[in-house]
Amino acid sequence: MAWFKKVRKPIEPQSDKPSRVPEGLWVKCPSCGEILYNKDLVASLNVCTKCTHHFRIGASERLKILFDRQWEEYDSGLKSTDPLKFTDTKPYKQRLDASITATGLKDAVICATGQIEGIEASVASMEYGFIGGSMGVVVGEKITRAIERAMDRQLPVVIVSCSGGARMMEGALSLMQMAKISAALARLDRARLPYVSVLTDPTTGGVTASFAMLGDVIIAEPKALIGFAGPRVIEQTIRQKLPEGFQRSEFLLEHGMIDMIVDRRELKAAVARVLRFGAPARQRSVTATATTSMAAAAAVPITAELAPPKP
């Protein structure tokens, strides 16, 4: 028998004492692995300060980035009625209720009007957290109304796409929204009003095949996944290996599919520059007059302060 015997101690259970470090205080960048302080990440508009990786953000956050101040939302009460009574692993109605609870939205897009650097515009921003930002009947109706509202008020249109494509739980009804929105954009074009399409990660499927690629100017975020079918499906179809970076925004810019790639921190200024160039003459003059008036008002107290005293 051995003189010494190592006694195996049982593993002690983890203490129930709560951690002093708050949950969600730090975020790890999936691209470079940098540990980021959450408040610093929010201050940089959810862009990694080391490698400029763009984290996905919600529809309301994008509107806060684009608009100067408060905006007016429209059609927020529209909700799908589950027209096909669709069921796969669980009923479509349950998926809708779960997404409404998770996001606080009735469907996958927010449509609003507001000012972008003094230029009033009609903006539709898609929410990926709502069933993958899929385009159903409600999404198609809300975006179409946003376009028609822009025509009535002579406003430019900005659509921020973030979607997995058409919502197949609504079958052919969801596919009809591609033609519906495209027809509304054709009327917008005949009215000579600009349309700026902003593509974010991901923009795929029927959204890419319709309104996302119909912009007068198409802007994409860096390294955003943009395409119709997924890379694996394409490789299996053509039986060839796809090139490096295929379906990323840099690849599309190189091949002429988009017009520019803009960092999220510079997106508002880039969109405003495009709208300022393409906005109707009436709105340009109103914006210029407002800017001049603000500058003049700001200059009054300075001039009075520097004026020499009267003898």
Image (cartoon, grey):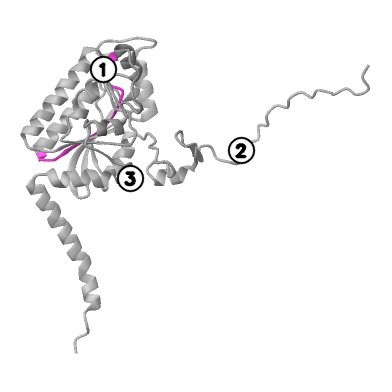
- Please give the label number shown on residue 131: none
Q: Amino acid at mark 2?
A: Ser
Quadrant (top left, top right, bottom left, bottom right) of the N terminus: top right
Tell me where residue 194 appears, x and y as whole percent.
13, 38
Distance Cα–Cα, label 1 vs label 3: 38 Å
Taking the magenta stretch, the answer to whether it contains residue 41 is no
Q: Is residue 7 visible?
A: yes
273 left or right, relative to 204: left
- Please give the label number shown on residue 81: 1
Tell me where residue 265 appears, x and y as whole percent.
33, 45
Observer-nearest of 9 and 149: 9
Label 3 neighbourhood size at 10 Å, few (<14), some (14-19), many (20+)?
A: some
**Measuring 14% from the left and 46% from the top, which residue is drawn there?**
277
- The mark that comes first in sequence, 3 or 2, is 2
Distance Cα–Cα, label 3 vs label 2: 34 Å
**Measuring 15% from the left and 56% from the top, which residue is drawn there?**
290
- Judging by the rendered image, the residue that carries numbered circle 2 is 19
Tell me the magenta residue range.
153-169
- Judging by the rendered image, the residue that carries numbered circle 3 is 265
State if disc 2 and disc 1 touch (CB < 8 Å). no
Observer-nearest of 93 and 43: 43
Q: Amino acid at mark 3?
A: Arg
- The mark that comes first in sequence, 1 or 3, is 1
Distance Cα–Cα, label 1 vs label 2: 45 Å
Q: Nearer the viewer, mark 3 or mark 2?
A: 3
**Where on the picture, by quarter, is residue 174?**
top left
Q: Amino acid at mark 1?
A: Thr
